[in-house]
Amino acid sequence: MNMEKFKQLNLSEELLDAIRREGFESPSEVQEKTIPLVLAGKDVIGSSETGSGKTLAFGAGIIDRTSPGAGIQALILTPTRELAEQVGQTIAKFSHKKGLRVAQVYGGVSMGPQINSLRHVDIVVGTPGRLLDHLKRRTLNLSRIKFLVLDEADRMLDMGFIRDVESIIKSCPTNRQTLLFSATLSQDIEYMAKKYMRNP
Ligand code: AMP
């Protein structure tokens, strides 16, 4: 496998190795377009669906720009527990070699283990309601966030999470990078982008 197109994206050797081990030969369209923007520090809106490879599209830059043990540097919001688990597992798989720790945080399970894991992780993937719960209890510290991802943003808004999502966004540092992925680009999504993103 020559991985030529992946190599041209300026990813770390460590991450390229992990990608090679997954058997990926070349980046998907959304990866090819998104990864350079994320590495260049830009805010990004991606209109793409599950199955397009969007997890690695936003995950690659985040993994390469996150340091183990330096606080929670990336927060990924998903509409459902299932997506949080799926995204969390994918990010964990690609960042394992680097020693990054990833927590999955969603409702319907007890708080205790989540509170513990939130003390030591670098990347958090979760659903808005439970994340807000942790914020209110001060068991989630977002002061070190460099990357905020809104994954399946349209579904998140359709499910009525807009106020929770806005509270969480407002708790993140303003000099963060914001990445928004959505299958559809509705007026609500445009409102979010206008209000919370910088020249996406
Ligand atoms: P996602 O849209 O991120 O949920 O990814 C959908 C599926 O595509 C997952 O099963 C990934 O393992 C796979 N995938 C992602 N990127 C690539 C790639 N560059 N080459 C081949 N498969 C990929």
Image (cartoon, rainbow, N blue to C red):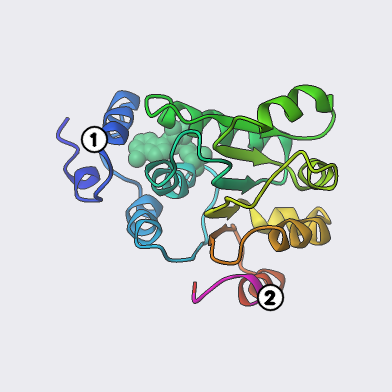
Q: Residue at point 76% right, 48% down? A: 128
CB under 8 Å between callouts 2 and 1? no
Amino acid carrying label 2: it is Tyr
Q: Nearer the viewer, residue 46 or 112?
A: 112
The residue lying toward the viewer, choosing from 166 and 180, is 166
Q: Which mark is residue 191?
A: 2
Q: Is residue 99 above or below residue 67?
A: above
Q: Quadrant of ligand 1?
A: top left
Front in this rendered view, residue 183 or 157 = 157
Q: Is residue 83 above or below residue 49?
A: above
* Residue 40 left/right relative to 26: right
Please state the horizontal and vertical placement of residue 140, each as a whole percent of the image. 72, 42
Residue 13 has which mark? 1
Q: Mark 2 or mark 1, which has the lower sequence index?
A: 1
What residue is shown at x 49% (from left), y 34% (from top)?
91
Numbered disc 1: secondary structure: helix
Residue 175 to residue 114: above or below: below
- Graded by Cα atoms within 10 Å as few (under 14), some (14 to 19) or many (20 or more), the crowding at tag 1 reads few
